[in-house]
Image (tube, helix red, strand yellow):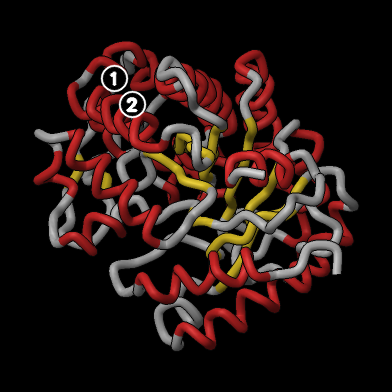
Amino acid sequence: MTANENVRAAFLGKRPERIPAGVCLGGSWPYFLEGVTLLELLEDPIRAAEIFYRVNEEVDADFVTVGTGATAFLIEGLGGDIAFSSDGAPAIASLLVQSEEDIASLDIQAALAVPKVQWLKEVAKETLRLNQNKRSIFISGRAPFTLAGQLLGLETLSKSLYKNKTLVEKLLDFTTELSVAYYEFMLEVPGMDGIFIADPSASGDVVSKRHFETWVVPYLTKVVSRLARHDKLSLVHICGNITDRLHLLPQTGIQMVSVDSKVDLLTAKEILKGQIALAGNVNPVASIEEKSPEEVYADATKCLDAGAKDGGFLLLPGCDLSAKARVENVRAITKAAHDWQVGV
C-alpha cells in the first residue's frame, strides 16, 4: 500500500499495512527551518510549496496539510489587520465584529479574491504537483466556532454565550458560510485528498461541554454536511482535554478526530468505540521539543500501543509544532509508526 492508501485505510477505520503518520499543523515550522519567513514567501508560492513539501518529505510524512499557519489571511481578506511573526503564524491584530450590523458588512467572496488567499491556492497547486499522489494532501482551515472567536475576540465570544446569544447565532451562521466557502475555494484545486478542520477555540480548556454541544457541534456538523458532496476525507483537531465531549463528535459526520496530548488515547478509543477514527497525540513540547529522538520514538510507540491496535489510527503530534521542534524528533515519530507491527 502507498502512503496515500494507508492514510485512507486509517480514516475508514481499517488496518493499514503500516500506521500512517505526519504533522497535522506546523505550517510555519518548515519555513523557520529554512530560515525564511512567511512574509518573505508571499511573492513566490512555488518556493513556498517546495520548502513545505521538502520538509514533510524529509520527515517521511504520510499525511500533509496545506495552508496551516496562514488562515489569518482569510480574516485580513474580510478587512482585518494581521501581524507577521518571524517564528510563527500571523496573528490577528484587530477585531472586525462588535455588533450584528458589523456581520452584514463582511464579504466572503471579496475575502477569497485577495492576493494572500489566492497565494494559498497556488501553494496548494504546487504542493500537489510535487507530491504526484505519493502522500495524502489535506487542505487546512478553521471551524465556525474558532472563526467566530477570531472575528469577535475569544473573550467577548465567551461572554456572549451567556449575554448575547442572538449575536453568537448570527456570527456562527456567518462563519459557517465562511468556512464552507473557503474549503470549496481550495477544493477547486484538483487532487486534494481531504479537509483538515482546526477548532482550537472549542478546547475543553476554553468552553464547557454544554456550550460545546450547543455552539460547536451543530455548526461543525453543517460544515461537514455541506462539504460531503466533494467526497473527501475529513479530520477535526481540537486542542485541550476534550475527553468529556468526544462522544459528541461522531454525530457531526467527521471521519477522524485529532486529540491533544492531554487526552488519554486508551480512554478516547473506549469512548469512540470505532464510530470514527482517532489521531494523536505525541506531546509537542515535553516530548518533541525537549527529548532525544530515541525518547520521542519511545513516546510515539506508547501512543501507538494505546491507539493503533484495532486500526483507524493516525499518529500525529498532539498540537502545533513550534520553531523549537527538531526535524530528527519529528522523523522519530514517523519512524515509530512505520516500524510498529500492525495487528500485533
Q: Earlier in the sequence, mark 2 or mark 1?
A: 1
Under tag 1, what secondary structure?
helix
Q: Decide: is 130 above or below 309.
A: above
Disc 2 residue crowd, few under 14, some 14–19, many 20+, Cα 10 Å: many
Q: Which residue is mark 2?
A: 125
Residue indicated by mark 1 = 111
Q: Amino acid at mark 1?
A: Ala
Q: Secondary structure at mark 2?
A: helix
Q: Are marks 2 and 1 in contact (CB under 8 Å)?
A: no
Instruction: Tell me: 174 left or right of 298.
Output: left
Quarter placement of the C terminus: bottom right
**Amino acid under label 2?**
Lys
In this picture, residue 57 sits left or right of residue 305 = left
Residue sitting nearer the eye, 265 or 243: 265
Residue drawn at point x = 57 percent, y = 60 percent: 316
Q: Position of residue 24 (x, y in %)?
A: 50, 52
- Distance from the alpha carbon under mark 2 to that under mark 1: 19 Å
Q: Position of residue 82 (x, y in %)?
A: 20, 42
Nearer to the camera, 206 or 76: 76
Vertical side of 282 occupied by 102: above or below: above
